[in-house]
């Protein structure tokens, strides 16, 4: 067994830390060659001290100066770079085999795409990258000759429930009728809409089952996360949108399912712990330990499934319509959502304004064919501008 060289984009975040937890269990299998963060310099310095990568990247030169100083004190020779282009350098110059794409939001698109173009095994957590550029991204994976393994727990579950040859001849669906994505419904699943008016960032980030970064926690509360995941599934698995269904499953034990035409439904179950899909992606097609306790069926009260109420979750409805519209509409949806969620987390935008900002942005920008990275990034920039203006008017 040869040692695999790993670059982790977003190593200081929730997925990044979980990835290092799994790697720590398997020093003979994996060597960390690049780590990247944005603002958490001390955490990145500690990670460098433990894993000794060739390259570390942070957002700006101020952060890089601090990191270099900390690494000199620790006697480390890691090369420290800064800025968006350095995220690409971390992939191209580290001679890595595997890239964990775990930056949050649109900021992760360009380096994830670079990993795809360079023919790496891409472990994709950064769903926003695929939502924005699905067609280009899948083309880049094909032309780069690498592999794309989904880390998002639902997509990882579906990947596990599909036959391996499914991906080799994408036109034939091997009896696959539908993909069923499960969703916990987040912390406000059963809350009357009137009570959502005063929701605080702390309440929105307190997910009942999963511990995650702040942005995805808010997305889970609004269910925009599931909307993004429907678009992600559309690109990953190549099934028509109407064959991708969402079910609320509050226990988060069944991570997703595939329904076949002979009546079989295959489900993947497990603890709500991201180390399982991460370990699966890292070692595929092997299985390795992930530090995750075994699932105890006898301790489970019951498992329930229901269809989501689109009035309770308008963000899910908006994502469905952007998915249907196609082109740059999903990139516009994603950008508006990122801006609205950041304003909710940091600037006092009321929780119930999130779908309103997204809807206004979507309806005031024309969608084009997502034919190039430039077109997609232009749509992203424009949508951010429009969403910020809407928020400014809202907060006045
Ligand atoms: P976190 O917020 O915990 O971490 C985000 C990471 O991205 C951090 O390392 C952060 O650096 C870095 N980062 C943030 N902004 C930038 C930027 N502009 N340029 C470069 N790096 C940046 O997020 P999560 O780990 O929760 O999520 C990461 C991705 O994985 C998201 O796309 C999310 O949707 C997806 N995902 C997450 C799951 C989870 O359980 N957490 C489950 C399924 C998918 P720093 O912290 O140093 O500022
Ligand atoms: Mg998910």
Image: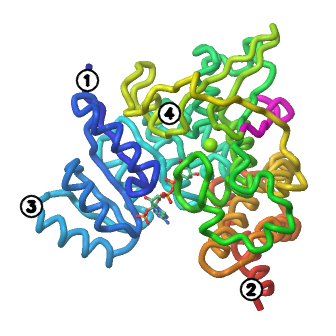
**Looking at the image, is mark 3 or mark 4 nearer the viewer?**
4
In the displayed image of the protein, which residue is found farthest to the bottom? 396
Which portion, as a residue range, is magenta?
A: 239-249
Question: Closer to the N terminus: mark 1 or mark 4?
Answer: 1
The span from disc 2 to disc 1 (Cα, nearest Å) is 54 Å
- Residue underneath mark 3: 75
Q: Is residue 369 above or below residue 167?
A: below
Residue 145: image x %, image y %? 49, 30
Question: Closer to the N terminus: mark 2 or mark 4?
Answer: 4
Q: Is residue 31 above or below residue 51?
A: above
Q: Secondary structure at mark 2?
A: helix
- The dot on residue 2 is 1
The span from disc 3 to disc 1 (Cα, nearest Å) is 28 Å
Question: Closer to the N terminus: mark 2 or mark 1?
Answer: 1
- The dot on residue 188 is none
- The dot on residue 277 is 4
- Residue underneath mark 2: 392
Q: Secondary structure at mark 3?
A: loop
Q: Secondary structure at mark 4?
A: helix
Q: Secondary structure at mark 1?
A: loop
User: What is the image's colouring?
Assistant: rainbow
Magenta span has 338? no
Taking the spot 33% from the left edge, 53% from the top edge, the residue there is: 35
């Amino acid at each position: 067994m040869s040692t695999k060289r790993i670059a982790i984009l977003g190593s200081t975040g929730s997925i990044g830390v979980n990835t290092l937890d799994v790697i720590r269990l398997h020093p003979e299998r994996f060597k960390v060659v690049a780590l990247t963060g944005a603002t958490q310099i001390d955490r990145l310095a500690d990670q460098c001290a433990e894993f000794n990568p060739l390259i570390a990247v942070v957002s700006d030169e101020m952060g890089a100066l601090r990191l270099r100083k900390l690494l000199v004190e620790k006697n480390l020779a890691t090369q420290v770079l800064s800025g968006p282009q350095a995220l690409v350098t971390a992939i191209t110059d580290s001679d890595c085999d595997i890239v964990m794409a775990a930056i949050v939001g649109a900021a992760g698109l360009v380096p994830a795409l670079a990993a795809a173009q360079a023919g790496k095994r891409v472990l994709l957590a950064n769903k926003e990258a695929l939502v924005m550029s699905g067609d280009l991204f899948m083309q880049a994976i094909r032309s780069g000759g690498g592999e794309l393994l989904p880390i998002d727990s639902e997509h990882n579950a579906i990947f596990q429930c599909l036959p391996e040859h499914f991906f080799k001849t994408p036109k034939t669906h091997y009896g696959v009728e539908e993909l069923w994505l499960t969703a916990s419904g987040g912390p406000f699943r059963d809350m009357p809409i009137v009570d959502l008016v005063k929701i605080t960032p702390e309440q929105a980030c307190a997910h009942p089952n999963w511990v995650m970064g702040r942005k995805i926690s808010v997305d889970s509360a609004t269910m925009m996360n599931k909307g993004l995941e429907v678009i992600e599934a559309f690109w990953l698995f190549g099934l028509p949108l109407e064959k991708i269904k969402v079910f609320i499953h509050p226990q988060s034990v069944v991570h997703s399912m595939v329904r076949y035409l002979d009546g079989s439904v295959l489900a993947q179950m497990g603890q709500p712990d991201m180390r399982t899909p991460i370990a699966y992606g890292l070692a595929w097609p092997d299985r390795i330990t992930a530090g995750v306790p075994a699932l105890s069926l006898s301790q489970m009260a019951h498992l329930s499934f229901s269809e989501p109420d689109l009035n309770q979750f308008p963000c899910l409805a908006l994502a469905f319509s952007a998915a249907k519209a196609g082109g740059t509409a999903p990139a516009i949806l994603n950008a508006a959502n990122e801006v609205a969620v950041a304003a909710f987390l940091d600037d006092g935008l009321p929780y119930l304004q999130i779908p309103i900002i997204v809807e206004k942005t979507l309806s005031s920008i024309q969608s084009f064919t997502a034919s190039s990275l430039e077109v997609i990034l232009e749509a992203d920039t424009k949508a951010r501008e429009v969403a910020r203006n809407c928020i400014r008017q809202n907060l006045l």
